[in-house]
Image: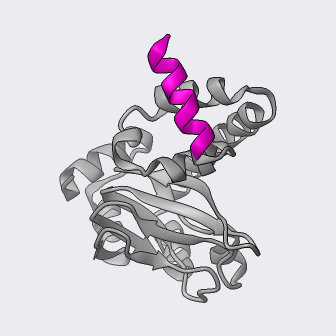
């Protein structure tokens, strides 16, 4: 995905001018990641709001037993980051790593605020972004508390058809709140149906 494609995606969500977009690209830091490279580790003080240009990132939490709990998978034009750490200036509770080679744009809190202040149309863009993220989060909570494992898996595949080809099964199982072994059994059962 190129800058022009990112600009088009932005414009679908808000009426951004070329000057608005140029300012975004001035403020956002571009970086590349190798597969399995961490962008943020739990406890990091320097955290960013992350726009994924290409590749796949996983945001996760590690519990006291060192079990990885996948919180989110992000692909092209997804945003991720520990918003609590970014906006409340404390160490990150989460880690973010690349599951594939990836290219991302990073906004720290200061540049995020500067972008919104100097180009207020971004406030509308981010409001829509956060609104959609909250809706998606609420739907995920409902799935987690009311769906069977099979229903969760089928919904995951429906919502994220390409991810199963990219993301290791152990992370998909973690995201769904089941063991990798149970997910394997479930997939075998579905394949036989």
Instruction: Decide: is 153 above or below 84.
Output: above
Quarter-of-image position of residue 181: top right
Q: Which residues fall within the magenta stretch?
A: 181-193
Whole-percent x, y for residue 140 in the image: 68, 38
**Residue at image location 63% in from the left, 30% down from the top:** 152
One can see residue 132 in this view: no
- Residue 126 horizontal/vertical position (percent): 54, 54
> Does the magenta segment cover residue 190?
yes
Nearer to the camera, 61 or 149: 149
Taking depth in this image into account, of 131 and 74 the one nearest to the observer is 74
Q: In which quadrant of the rendered view does residue 64 lie?
A: bottom right
Considering every residue shown, the one lying at the far bottom of the view is 45
Residue at position x 56%, y 74% in the image: 113
**Residue in view at x 43 percent, y 51 percent:** 168
95 drawn magenta: no
Q: At 26% across and 57% down in the image, what residue appears?
A: 18
Placement of 108 over or under 76, stated as above or below:
below
State the residue in front, 33 or 51.
33
């Amino acid at each position: 995905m190129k800058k022009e494609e990112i600009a088009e995606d932005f414009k679908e969500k808000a009426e951004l001018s070329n000057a608005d977009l140029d300012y975004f690209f001035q403020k956002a830091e571009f970086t590349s990641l190798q597969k399995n490279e961490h962008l943020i580790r739990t406890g990091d003080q320097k955290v960013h709001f992350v726009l994924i240009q290409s590749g796949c990132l996983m945001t996760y939490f590690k519990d006291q037993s060192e079990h990885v709990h996948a919180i989110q998978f992000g692909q092209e034009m997804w945003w991720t980051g520990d918003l609590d750490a970014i906006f409340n200036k404390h160490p990150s509770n989460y880690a973010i790593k690349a599951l594939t080679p990836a290219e991302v744009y990073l906004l720290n809190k200061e540049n995020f605020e500067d972008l919104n202040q100097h180009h207020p149309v971004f406030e509308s863009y981010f409001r829509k972004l956060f609104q959609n993220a909250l809706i998606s989060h609420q739907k995920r909570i409902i799935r987690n508390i009311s769906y069977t494992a099979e229903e969760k898996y089928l919904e995951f595949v429906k919502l994220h058809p390409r991810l199963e080809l990219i993301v290791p099964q152990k992370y998909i199982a973690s995201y769904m709140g089941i063991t990798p072994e149970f997910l394997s059994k479930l997939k075998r059962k579905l394949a036989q149906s």
